[in-house]
Image (spheres, grey):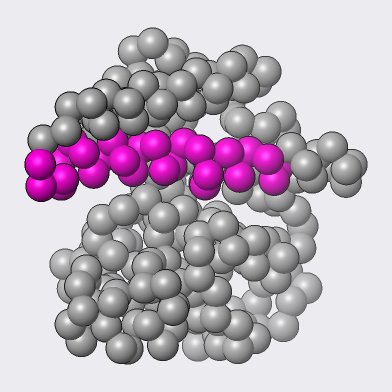
Amino acid sequence: MQAPPEQVQRGNMAPNQVLLLHAHESGPNPIKVAIVLELLSIPYALKMWQFGHGPNGVKGEAFLAINENGRVPALEDPNTGVVAWESGAVINYLLAEYDHDGKLGPKDASKQARVDFDKWVFFLVSGMAPMLGQVNWFRHYHAVDNKDALARFVAQAYRTFDVLEAQLKKTSGASILGGGFSAVDAHFYPWVWEYEFGGLTLDGHPLIRKWFDKIAGMEEVKKAYTEIDKAAKGQN
């Protein structure tokens, strides 16, 4: 996160004010957005919320006025008046509004490049992420031990890892799409980062491990995690 200047000049854009990212101390989806904000050098502040229905809860009246679904992330942009929620919609907005050079979008203007970009984002949000989320739920939070459900979702999580591993063969593990890092990688990384918490391993997926380690070393990615951790501790 950048220092909170009142305005910042980005490329050929008019000066813009600090955006507000609504987040929680845990969970992959706010991290995705923070990574994109860092990579695009967009100044942002963080507002941290808790689970539940209290005054600072995502199911409370204050947050429901921002996001009717009561989930983070949400993003408020005072420059345009836009309020976005659902991480895919938030990132799409940021790319459309601030990534005029196409740094994180499709790597060329072809229809196939646009479709490839979208299909991998949709695979993450409708395939891999829900499976990993259910692994975490049945591993840590479900009130009754359900080994059958856990086994099913573990198997499905590894199936999605197989799909990603096959895709990464096309770039020797450098990035999910050809042409280098894109917002697709930003979508996937925080979910794959959860693998240890879910009791999974990357031992059978060497290209995912290579890709994962490369992204873990990016300064903007490390900064995104640091800023959310600091905000959760009240240090921002």
Q: Quadrant of residue 77?
A: bottom right
Give the image location of residue 168, x and y in percent.
59, 21
Residue at the outermost left position: 144
Q: Residue at x 78, y 42 (%)?
A: 115
Above-or-below relation of 203 to 7: above
Q: Residue at 50% x, 80% y: name it.
A: 76
Q: Quarter of the image holding residue 196?
A: top left
Q: Let me know if residue 7 appears in the view.
A: no
The magenta stretch is 117-144
31 above or below 126? below
Q: Position of residue 222 (x, y in %)?
A: 37, 47
- What x and y, as percent, mark residue 55? 20, 87
Percent across and percent down for residue 180 are: 66, 34
Magenta stretch: dominant secondary structure: helix
| Direction from residue 140 to residue 110 in the image, left or right | right
Total numbered circles = 0
Comparing 93 with 140, the one in front is 140
| Quadrant occupied by the N terminus | bottom left
Image quarter in which the C terminus is found: bottom left
Q: Is residue 176 magenta?
A: no
Q: Is residue 133 left or right of residue 56?
A: right
Is 131 covered by the magenta stretch?
yes
